[in-house]
Image (cartoon, grey):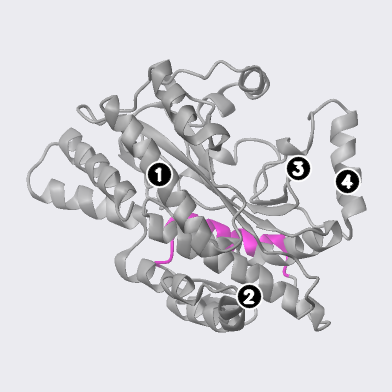
Amino acid sequence: MNSSGPPFTIGIEEEYLLVDKETRSLVVDPPESLMAECEERCGAQVTSELLRSQIEIGTKVCENVKEAEVELRRLRRIIIDVAANHGMAPIASSTHPFSRWSEQKQTEKDRYNALTIEMQAAARRLLICGMHVHVGINDDELRIDLMNQMSYFLPHLLALSCSSPFWEGRDTGLKSYRLTVFDALPRTGLPERFASYAEYERHINILMNAGLIEDATRIWWDLRPSARYPTLETRVMDVCTRLDDTISLAALLVCIMRMLYRLRVSNQRWRMYTPMLIRENRWRAMRYSFDEGLIDLGKGGVVGFENLLDEILSLVSDDAKALGCVEEVARTRNILTRGTSAHRQLKCYELEQADGKEKTECLQAVVDMLISDTAEGV
């Protein structure tokens, strides 16, 4: 492969919810000292989020998956330790099992105030957390080309990451309820397709010149060219509760991008399918995770997810070797065996219910499991 190709560096951002260890509810108004201590130990790698019960961390630019794992483990550990000093704990879950968005306090920042003034309740109820993975693609045209092709795989990544089955104390029946909340905002969902970077810029400039957005950071697609870094940023996934799941999905993602680039170098490309069909798979991933399979768009029928994952792993085998993440990519199969966070949350609730516990106690037990799983391997 061309040695002057993309660097395929990795950066991972994770959003966590802060819970009170005693009540297991979200901490509505954490003390300023908590964020100050986090910033003292993490610097700019930790930031506040829209709601005060949320906190976000971001790794530095990592050369490979193993470096990203070390970075993420360090940052998770810091947040866990600092939160513990205040009687709290972070949970890496895209929704809280029972706390309500209407009871949360907003972080006082101009950009957050502007967002809620513009979006009203659609923004105020964003009590959701995600995980964003940046992959270093240092060529504008290549970023657009890979974005167009990568859309096909977004439902597969989502299906393996689901962690939001509950909303305000109810089983939603969905494994990823988070996206139903986020999709209420404009400029979300699958990315648009563009013939060139110039075409992409023209569309962004129309919105900017009309005064509708300040810049391209207000484009919240599942996958987008980053407005701040020379990266392609994947945003479709729920935040993974377990650290090893985060790393496995980041590894799989970067390998898929390298595979698509490898096809391009060989004058080949992934077949393009209509957004309508990809959206159908996106919905299936939200609803079922991997339980009911996804549509194999080439075959035109629903196929079991295990078979689909085996096919993807075969496609990226050479890329996993080249990027030094064979083990990490292979561990995606563990998610099918163990279940996503959503599966584990629902199972925990069912077991507590079968044991005769009240609904509140069952939901608190789910939070306890999330606290434990967030710290697993950290």
The answer to whether mark 1 and mark 2 are in CB contact below 8 A is no
**Label 4 packing within 10 angstroms: few (<14), some (14-19), many (20+):** few
| Residue 156 visible in rendering | no
Prevailing secondary structure of the magenta residues: helix
Q: Which residue is mark 1?
A: 76
254 vs 354: above or below: below
Q: Position of residue 231 (x, y in %)?
A: 71, 53
Q: Which residue is mark 2?
A: 297
Rounded to the nearest angstrom, the CA distance separating label 1 from label 2 is: 38 Å
The disc placed on residue 283 is none
- Which one is nearer the viewer's eye here, 251 or 103? 251
| Residue 297 visible in rendering | yes
Q: Which residue is mark 3?
A: 227
Of label 4 and label 2, which has the lower sequence position? 4
Quadrant assignment for the N terminus: bottom right
Residue at left offset 19%, top offset 28%:
22
Rounded to the nearest angstrom, the CA distance separating label 3 from label 1 is: 26 Å
Task: Specify the segment rendered in magenta.
Answer: 273-291
